[in-house]
């Protein structure tokens, strides 16, 4: 398995853990507001790939210094080698957090059954009616809701999160999304930051204000146990 980049030490990506963060290449979605276009689009200028062997050697040397490993992307679950790689990481004694778009529920199910993920962070792009528009590809939302159900009914820690973009998410969209994950323990709304985006037109977009983000959270709170924005 090859990686498109990494962060050797992070204090914020894995709640309560000091972690290394790995970024896989390629994605099944084409979100216009994606902030990692270099990992998503083919034929983009990239750093030399990072091999699995190099990563595992680094992690072996960091045993006792790092608590966990975050695998992000791109979309990690499109890689067939992911389950085997995560088994190696767990064998080294690290906890694993997986960032996923939930488009591959069968992979999510496998990882839950194999107990190779301790914490899932799953992005919810939109309500069912708008999923294809916001994700940038034709998609069956039932696959997404299947992943939601698998994660919520597992013994893993988890969070769901939605990056909120004014041009794509009207205020009424947030409670619609929250209803799809009703009863979830944690739902985070992420304030869109118009820096690097897959669609350059969004780089001039105006994010929701702090007061507006708090109001969006309030609209979601009747459906989930905890909702906050960041």
Image (cartoon, rainbow, N blue to C red):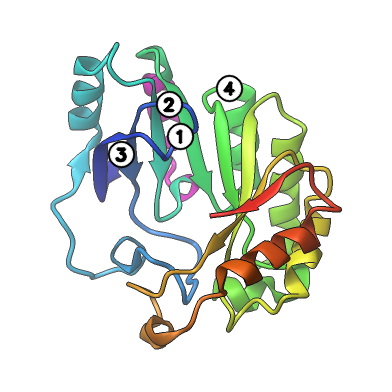
Please say whether residue 167 is one of the residues in the magenta stretch.
Answer: no
For disc 2, the neighbor class at 10 Å (few under 14, some 14 to 19, many from 20) is: some
Element at label 3 = loop
Q: Which residue matches tag 3?
A: 1
Q: How many marks?
A: 4
| One can see residue 81 in this view | no
Q: Nearer the viewer, mark 3 or mark 1?
A: 1
Residue 140, horizontal then vertical, whole percent: 71, 65
Q: Nearer the viewer, mark 2 or mark 3?
A: 2
Q: Earlier in the sequence, mark 3 or mark 1?
A: 3
Question: Picture quarter containing residue 11?
Answer: top left
> Residue 176 or 27: which is nearer the viewer?
176
Q: In the image, what residue occupies the spot 38% across and 30% down?
A: 69
Q: Earlier in the sequence, mark 4 or mark 2?
A: 2
Q: Nearer the viewer, mark 4 or mark 2?
A: 2
Asked if marks 4 and 2 touch (Cβ < 8 Å), the reply is: no
Residue 17: give its label. Answer: 2
Marks 3/1: CA distance? 22 Å
User: What segment carries the magenta color?
Assistant: 77-89
Q: Which residue matches tag 4?
A: 114
Q: Which residue matches tag 1?
A: 14
Residue 196, horizontal then vertical, whole percent: 33, 72
Magenta stretch: helix, strand or loop mostly: helix
Q: In the image, what residue occupies the spot 17% across and 30% down?
A: 54
């Amino acid at each position: 398995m090859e990686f498109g980049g990494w962060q050797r030490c992070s204090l914020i990506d894995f709640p309560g853990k000091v972690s290394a963060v790995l970024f896989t290449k390629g994605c099944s979605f084409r979100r216009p507001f994606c902030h990692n276009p270099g990992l998503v689009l083919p034929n983009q200028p990239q750093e030399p790939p990072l091999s699995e062997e190099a990563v595992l050697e680094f992690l072996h040397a960091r045993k006792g210094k790092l608590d966990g490993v975050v695998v992000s992307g791109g979309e990690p679950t499109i890689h067939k080698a992911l389950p085997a790689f995560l088994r190696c990481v767990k064998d080294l004694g690290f906890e694993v957090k997986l960032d996923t778009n939930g488009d591959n529920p069968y992979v999510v199910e496998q990882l839950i059954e194999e107990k190779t993920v301790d914490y899932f962070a799953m992005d919810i792009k939109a309500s069912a009616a708008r999923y294809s528009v916001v994700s940038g590809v034709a998609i069956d939302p039932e696959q997404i809701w299947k992943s939601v159900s698998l994660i919520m009914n597992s013994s893993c820690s988890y969070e769901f999160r939605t990056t909120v973009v004014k041009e794509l998410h009207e205020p009424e969209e947030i409670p619609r999304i929250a209803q799809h994950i009703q009863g979830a323990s944690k739902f985070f709304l992420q304030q869109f930051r118009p820096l690097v985006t897959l669609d350059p037109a969004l780089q001039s977009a105006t994010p929701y204000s702090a007061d507006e983000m708090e109001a969006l959270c309030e609209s979601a709170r009747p459906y989930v146990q905890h909702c906050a924005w960041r």
